[in-house]
Image (spheres, rainbow, N blue to C red):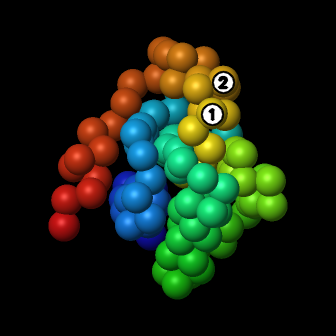
């Protein structure tokens, strides 16, 4: 699976669990960590965990190794490392506090609507 397909899979999995305000940042050339960051949030601990679990389950079903998942039990900021794509699933309050979009303000964004098209 190429990075674009992985990005689409991640975005669709988050969207399936009603992730809010999804943003995708193109990190190529800006970060050695990953090519894309998918950033979204849920409004409760349960929703945040459901979004993260769906991303992990979809990755597993498609033979993608989840390299690391951090923060699941606390459900405030869950980081899912899929290699070329890193998903950041926040609780609404934490997302505002950490504001990754501003931190990586020089990163161009990807059109999320196009990623979710069937």
Residue 65 in the figure: left or right of residue 1: right
Task: Tell me if 73 is positioned left or right of 15 in this view.
Answer: right
Label 1 sits on residue: 93
Q: Quadrant of residue 80?
A: bottom right
Separation of residues labelled 2 and 1 (CA atoms): 6 Å
Instruction: Name the one closer to the observer, 3 or 69.
Output: 69
Residue that appears at 72% across and 46% down: 76
Q: Is residue 4 left or right of residue 100?
A: left
Q: Please determine whether, in this image, residue 111 is positioned above or below residue 6.
A: above
In this picture, is 43 found above or below 98? below
* Viewport quadrant of the N terminus: bottom left
Q: Secondary structure at mark 2?
A: helix
Residue at the (42%, 46%) spot, across then down: 20
Residue 78: where, in percent of width, then height? 69, 51
Find residue 101 and report its horizontal and vertical position in percent. Answer: 52, 24
Measuring 33% from the left and 37% from the top, which residue is drawn there? 110
The residue positioned 80% from the left and 61% from the top of the image is 73
At numbered mark 1, what does the secondary structure look like: helix, strand or loop? helix
Residue contact at pointers 2 and 1, CB within 8 angstroms: yes
The residue labelled by disc 2 is 97
- Residue 38 position, x and y percent, is 50, 45
Query: In the picture provided, is 47 more to the left or to the right than 22?
Result: right
Quarter of the picture containing the C terminus is bottom left
């Amino acid at each position: 699976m190429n990075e674009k397909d992985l990005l689409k899979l991640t975005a669709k999995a988050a969207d399936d669990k009603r992730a809010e305000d999804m943003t995708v940042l193109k990190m190529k050339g800006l970060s050695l960590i990953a090519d894309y960051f998918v950033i979204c949030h849920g409004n409760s601990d349960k929703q945040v965990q459901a979004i993260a679990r769906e991303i992990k389950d979809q990755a597993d079903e498609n033979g993608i190794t989840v390299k690391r998942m951090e923060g699941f039990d606390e459900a405030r900021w869950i980081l899912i490392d899929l290699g070329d794509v890193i998903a950041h699933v926040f609780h609404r309050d934490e997302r505002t506090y950490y504001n990754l979009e501003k931190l990586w303000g020089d990163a161009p964004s990807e059109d999320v609507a196009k990623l979710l098209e069937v």
